[in-house]
Amino acid sequence: MRPLLKCAAVALCLAFGLAGCVWLRLLEVKNQLAEFDQNLRVQVVHDYFIVHFLHPVLLSDDFIELAKLRPSRVATLPEGYRWFLDFRMEGGKGRNQPGKTLVFAMTFTPEDRLAAFEFSPLFLQMAPPAFLEASLRSLGRGKVDQGKQQLKVDPEDLPKLSARLPDRRTILAVLGPPVEQSRQDDLLVLLYRFKADAEPVEPEYESRRLAEAKLFFDPAKDELVRLAGRFAGLKLSIDYRKLIAAPPQDRVARHP
């Protein structure tokens, strides 16, 4: 099966005309996610969520190719280097909220391969560690839609957690008020906007600096049930309800 997948990926690379073929390397990462514990290690250090790639595949140039943004900051390490992509949270009328910066950090080897990806505490308010790790683990079982360039995971393939859903009061205490508030499908939706301190690779990609996160809450319980976000061209959606294990009585009722 893997040789067939690689052949399909090579054909896709040729169709897109991508030098070095970032899509082939993305497929290899997906294969690694399918065997998560053999290829990745997760750490939570001082409220930072870090994913270590034990067998690095992606290149720093792949990040540029996908995001169409250059890093906000660069730091040199004894072995390798780190890139940072800083998104400053916007308040009303596009004004930044002081001290509210969402940061993604990438550590690269001297051979320019991604060795670690780090999520900052602000992001973890929207995607708590247990749910974020479960979502990453599920990606290895997802199906690739080449036409839409999407990766979707069947709900039956999602791991089940006993963790509690985040509550709105705690999230608001950290993130502050949203730029917009609305209702959708009987859920309360809070919208947060961000803007990257980064240069686009071309002026036509200026819009890639703009990011947003929609937080969906169950108004009856005041719990976060879904996250929908867009950062540097990457769209993500996590339905936390699908990751919560059903109570024992529900399981009995469903399987008499």
Image: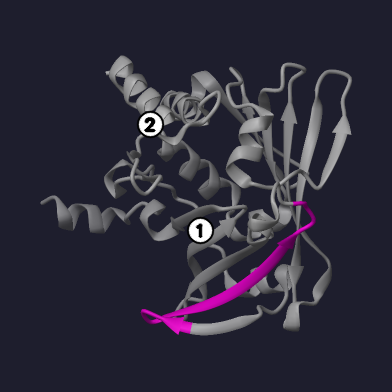
CB within 8 Å, label 2 to label 1: no
Residue 12, label in figure? 2
Q: Give the residue furthest to the left.
A: 256
- Magenta highlight range: 183-199
Q: Does 209 sit left or right of 20 as displayed?
A: right
Residue 223, image x, y percentages: 51, 70
Residue 84, image x, y percentages: 78, 43
Disc 2 on helix, strand or loop? Answer: helix
Determine if the magenta segment contains residue 187.
yes
Residue 164, label in figure? 1
Residue 159, image x, y percentages: 38, 42
| Residue depicted at 30% across the width and 49% down the height | 155
- Magenta span: chief secondary structure: strand
Mark 2, Cα crowd under 10 Å, few <14 / some 14-19 / many 20+, is some
Determine if the magenta segment contains residue 44.
no
CA separation, marks 2 and 1?
Answer: 41 Å
Q: In the rendered image, which quarter contains the N terminus?
A: top left
